[in-house]
Amino acid sequence: MTEMPIPNYVDDQMQVFFWEVDEFFPALIIFVVMFMWDQLLLGLVATLIFVKLFGRFKSNHMAGVLFHMVWWSGVMALNKKFDNGSVREIAK
């Protein structure tokens, strides 16, 4: 029998450079908006500050906290059973 390496963290989020996806896309949006307003330096600073603060927030909370917050606000469906996060009670 041949030994095969098993990854330690199979359910980690996808990475873009050295950021996880839930850090990268909001930072990209901040940077692009500030770039379109001709505020490149301010965009870089705001992006780095956001990534630093959000990384600290993520380390103190559960994994995937941004996706949970987006679902809880009703913007995104979680799956077929839980499609609307803005419903707080289910009528019986």
Image (cartoon, rainbow, N blue to C red):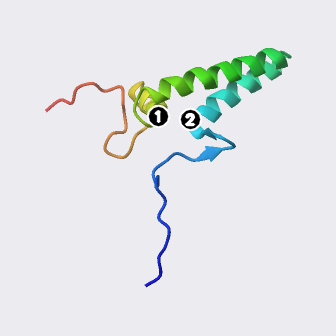
Q: Which residue is mark 2?
A: 22
Q: Which residue is mark 1?
A: 67
Going by the image, does 10 lie left or right of 40?
left
Q: Is residue 31 above or below residue 4?
A: above
Disc 1 crowd rating (10 Å Cα; few below 14, some 14-19, many 20+) is some
User: Is 80 or 34 nearer to us in this picture?
Assistant: 34
For badge 2, the amino acid type reads: Asp
Horizontal and vertical percent position of residue 31: 74, 25
Horizontal and vertical percent position of residue 5: 50, 68
Q: Is residue 65 above or below residue 1?
A: above
| Sequence-first disc among 2 and 1 | 2
Q: Is residue 52 above or below residue 15?
A: above
SS under mark 2: helix
Residue depicted at 36% across the width and 46% down the height: 80
Residue depicted at 83% across the width and 17% down the height: 41
Going by the image, does 66 lie left or right of 16?
left
User: Is 52 or 50 nearer to us in this picture?
Assistant: 52
Mark-to-mark CA distance, 2 and 1: 8 Å
